[in-house]
Image (spheres, rainbow, N blue to C red):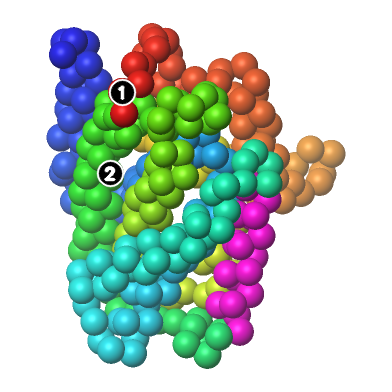
Amino acid sequence: MPRSRWLGPAAAAGVLLVMAPFGYTLKLGIVTTITAALMLALVAHGWNMLGGFGGYLNFGMAVFFGVGVYSSAILNERLAWGMWQTLPVAAGLAVLTALPVGLATLRLRGHYFAIFTLVITFLAQSAALNLAITNGASGVYTTAPATGPRPIAALFYYCFLGFVVLATGLAYAVQHSNFGYALRAIREDEDAAAALGVRTTAVKLAALLLGAALAGLAGGLYAFQTGYIEPTGTFSLGLSLDVVLVCVIGGLGTWQGPLLGAGIVVLLEQWLRTLFATVHPFGWTIPIESNRIVLGLLLVLFALYAKRGVAGIFRPARGSQLNV
């Protein structure tokens, strides 16, 4: 195996090692910001399985994330389950939700698949608003397994950091496996991949289910971190758009992409919110939500002129041999 292949993982391991004490050494606001970036990176790793490696634009990650959120919250509120008890259920129910979605949609291609996943996000939000088990617009409260601002902040920082490490290792393994090669073949030319013997539907479904598990896991943690959930904020199209932006900026189909992109997107969002709150051109007030316009423009620029993202700067272009 080329020695250069280990340089990236070694650098990432060094960064994570440096981050280990941050939960108790940095200010609470900074810890919270880093935790938000880690959560986004975890969901983005899930999206990257099919969207990045396989080339299928998916706007439905908020559905799998939301199923994980509500699974953990309902089990905690109604059955008094602890956080660690609910997480496997959150991931499992997200996978069970993704299964019929995948079976129904993965024969669609291009814009048709993207539009369908967009529709199911709104359907999930509507269901959460009207089902009795979710308490509708009243929402659900959860009890965090820690008390006090610092212990709570540190707990979720280390939880998300640990799961991001595992998800990054999984993404690295996928990228350098036959499964990853098959997904990239589908991304480049699905008909040709099928002609070469790749079971395209099964490969795409496996990638979707794997991504849904990661999103559900992130949702289960988030349910306890936020303490209160409601349908509109949980099944938010903004989350689905953010994970696409993270992967496009960081690098589609790479294990580094979600890590790099999440840090850039969260820091940029924080900076833009601060900037728009203080800048008043011609005496006008700029809505904080205008940061979406800037992020959207950034997405277009990367999609047009930097298709390999930030990770492409450090990774030379090379082909991958298909062997399935």
The residue segment tinted magenta is: 113-130
Q: Which quadrant of the figure contains the C terminus?
A: top left
| Residue 260 placement (x, y as % from top left) | 39, 31
| Residue 170 placement (x, y as % from top left) | 25, 40
Q: Which residue is drawn at 75% across and 42% down?
A: 280
| Residue 40 placement (x, y as % from top left) | 42, 47
Q: Which residue is drawn at 48% across and 27% down?
A: 195
Q: Which picture quadrant has residue 298?
A: top right
- The reply to whether residue 265 is visible in this rendering is no
Q: Which quadrant of the figure contains the N terminus?
A: top left
- The reply to whether residue 170 is visible in this rendering is yes
Is residue 120 shown in magenta?
Answer: yes
Q: Name the residue under label 2.
A: 167
Q: Which picture quadrant has residue 104?
A: bottom right
| Residue 41 placement (x, y as % from top left) | 38, 43
Does dot 1 land on a helix, a strand or a loop? loop
Q: In this view, does 239 lie to the left or right of 108?
A: left
Identify the mark at residue 323; answer none if there is no mark. 1
Is residue 265 shown in magenta?
Answer: no
Mark 1 neighbour class, 10 Å CA radius: few under 14, some 14 to 19, many 20 or more? few
Q: Which residue is drawn at 31% across and 23% down?
A: 323
Magenta stretch, overall SS: helix
Q: Which amino acid does label 1 sit on?
A: Asn
Q: Distance between the residues labelled 1 and 2?
A: 24 Å
Residues at circles 1 and 2 in contact by the CB criterion of under 8 Å: no
Q: What residue type is labelled 2?
A: Ala
Identify the mark at residue 218; answer none if there is no mark. none
Image height of 299 relative to 229, above or below = above
Q: Which picture quadrant has residue 303?
A: top right
Q: Nearer the viewer, residue 27 or 52?
A: 52
Q: Earlier in the sequence, mark 1 or mark 2?
A: 2
Give the foreground label among 1 and 2. 1
